[in-house]
Image (cartoon, rainbow, N blue to C red):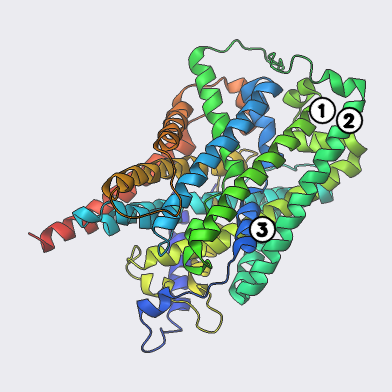
Amino acid sequence: MPSVEFLIKLINISLSFLFIIMSFEDLPPGENRENRENRKKIINTFSGLGYNINHIIGAGIFITPSSVWRLAQSPGSALMLWIAGGFISLFGSMIYVELGTRFPEGSGEQKYLEETFDENKKGKNIGHIFSFVMTTIILPGAIIADSYACSKYILYAIKGNDGNENIYFGIDYIELRILAIVILLSVTVYHTYSNKLAIKINQTLALFKTLALVVLSIIGLAFLRDNRSKDHWIGIFNNTPSDDVHERSVSEQIGCYGYAMIEVLFSYEGWNNLNYLTPELDSPERRLKVSSILSVITSSILYFLMNIAYITVVDPKSAINSQDIIAISFGNTLSGELGKTIISILISISAFGSVGAMVFMGSRAITYAAKYKFIPKISEKLYHWNDTNDIPKYALLLQFVYCAIIILFAPVGKSFFPFFSSMSQYLAMVFFGISSVCLLIVKRRLSSAEYNKFKVHYSIIILYLLCIVFIAVAPFFPIPQSEYAVLNYQSYMPYVISWIAVFVGVSTWYLYDYKKYVSNNS
């Protein structure tokens, strides 16, 4: 296993190489920030809806139902969690639509932090905390998880098995990691080439995935004609026993539902995609309302139907005790090995599309953060857009290099996807909650100002915040190891790492930004 010193040296070498590449091209003379902020309006309602759906429908709906069933202990309880996840995501989307329509010139949470704390003249600095965790944990974690899932199920379709992922630089390890990096590179390349091409690919994949889920849902529901499939619905809220029966305590139940909700919400992640793209969104006040909310409603309906299809087709007890994910068992029940191969290919395509949407959005988030020099030595380069095709190529390059290094050397084992997806989603949820607090403050501060574009009732914001608090606390409750053995990581490492990242971001802000602000104004 590579030593920590070796990994640090490799990262330093990679970043040095990146800086050298960036030094080859200077900013065009006379270019200023005002000009660079006037982005071409390349996204309309339909393409915005496509970007959100393509981000939301990734590998999650295929991979996470298995562990959600194990954690919830019954298909009925799991189904309720998916419904709850849809409502929570809808509430979050409504909150972000109001934030986006109030501040359409910004890009996501950093802008909302800036505006909320502007009275103290510290908002832009506080936004650095979000910039740090967004560019080091939240976005990379999600991109890495889906890139890995795409690679894994391409190989599954070819080889017919998961392979041995538990040996550093074994043949399966190398195949999985290198293919995941190639997938991420291919996505980065076509985003660097043309925005129009990226949008067309995104729209095509979003439409394909939507139709694929509709077809799978219809096929699954058709099994209701079979009496054996109808039996799966008898007592769906009764605990489905696993091989290792364990009576859970109250604290274990809280922990299990907390873990399950994070996995469900990762599958819904992407409903706020357009909030990072408002500078390129044609009429954000109108587009956000339609594209963002409709994408959540569409995805929620599809997820509900897919879970009904899973329950109908797959025997709950065999699904909970199987080493395969439920989607693979679903395909196997439909048409044996051919069905497993088809589902594997669908997972890969779905994950590939989600990676594409995240790469597009992530590069924009990086350039907006670079506006305030969150990485002092290279921020000016990251904030540079290519004039010929209006693409933030340096941000795309940095994003690829960082993710590729982590993909290559991250811990081994089948816990790879849930580890990175949980870490990413947990931190995202924390900042969703902070943004909700920002909206409460802004609504109160600007209550007398004229605003009639989109308003969220206070009760929805409070309810959403309560859900966030539960999700933030619940994963630290214990869970039965036997029920979560498929993930290997029984510890709290994804969530500990998340809070460490927040602490580092806060420390950096205080040491370099806040103290500088105080000294300049003392």
Please name which of the two marks, 1 or 3, marks the residue nearer to the observer. Answer: 1
Query: On the rendered structure, is 401 left or right of 242?
Result: left
Picture quadrant where residue 414 is located: top right
425 w.r.t. 150: above or below: above
Query: Disc 2 versus disc 1: distance between alpha carbons?
Result: 7 Å
**What amino acid type should be assigned to the residue bearing mark 1?**
Thr
Comes first in the chain, label 2 or label 3? 3
Comes first in the chain, label 1 or label 3? 3
Q: Are marks 2 and 3 in contact (CB under 8 Å)?
A: no
Using the image as rendered, state which of residue 498 and residue 161 is in the foreground.
498
Please name which of the two marks, 2 or 3, marks the residue nearer to the observer. Answer: 2
Q: Are marks 2 and 1 in contact (CB under 8 Å)?
A: yes
Picture quadrant where residue 37 is located: bottom left
* Residue for point 41% across, 87% down: 28
The residue indicated by pointer 2 is: 223
* Residue for point 74% across, 56% down: 207
* Residue 474 location (% of width, % of height): 46, 26
The residue indicated by pointer 1 is: 312
The residue indicated by pointer 3 is: 178
The answer to whether residue 381 of the structure is visible from this angle is yes
